[in-house]
Structures are given as C-alpha cells and as structure tokens.
Amino acid sequence: MTDEKITYDEAVQRLEAIVVQLERGGKNLDETLAMFEEGTELLRQCQTELAEAEGRLAELRLDEAETMVAEDA
C-alpha cells in the first residue's frame, strides 16, 4: 500500500476485498501476511476517521444544545 491517503469508502472497499481474498486462501505466507498488514492499516484508518466524525457530531450536538438553551433564556 502507498502512503497516499485514500477515502473512507475506498478503504472499506479495499478492506472487504482483502477479507474475501484471505477467506479464499491459496496465498503463500508472505502474501497473506502482507494482505493482513494492509488490512490492519486500513482498519486503523477507518476507525480513526469514524472517531473523528463522532467527535464532530458531538460538537455539533453540543453547539445546538447551547443555542437552544440561549434562546430559551
């Protein structure tokens, strides 16, 4: 895998493709290990992006709640 950052959707698609290939088997140990390492990195990237999105959503909800409280005051 390159150092270029791919989108979340691309990462999920690639991760799904890796899982299918690993489930099929027939790869030698080095290929299997390389695919597992790539999958692990993709999973880490997806988890990071999801955590960032959850953080942004929490901020938006907090901002909205603060606005509603201020309007009621």
Image: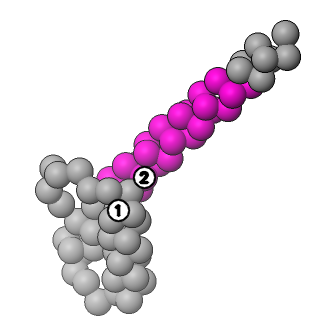
Q: Nearer the viewer, residue 8 or 73?
A: 73
Quarter where residue 30 is shown = bottom left
The residue carrying pointer 1 sits among few (fewer than 14), some (14 to 19) or many (20 or more) residues within 10 Å by Cα, namely some
Q: Is residue 55 visible?
A: yes
Give the side of residue 26 with respect to residue 67, left or right.
left
Say which residue appears at 40% left-offset and 82% top-offset. 20
Q: Is residue 36 visible?
A: no
Give yes or no for residue 44 being in the magenta stretch: yes
Percent position of residue 21, x then y: 34, 82
Give the side of residue 49 with respect to residue 18, left or right.
right
Which stretch appears magenta? 40-65
Give the side of residue 68 with respect to residue 1, left or right.
right
Label drawn at residue 40: none
Query: At label 2, which amino acid type do we have?
Result: Cys
List the residue tagged with mark 1. Answer: 11
Give yes or no for residue 69 being in the magenta stretch: no
Residue with the most extreme right position: 72
Q: Does 19 sit above or below residue 5?
A: below
Query: At label 1, which amino acid type do we have?
Result: Ala
Q: Nearer the viewer, residue 12 or 25?
A: 12
Say which residue appears at 84% left-offset and 10% top-offset. 73
Q: Does 23 sit above or below residue 56?
A: below
List the residue tagged with mark 2. Answer: 46
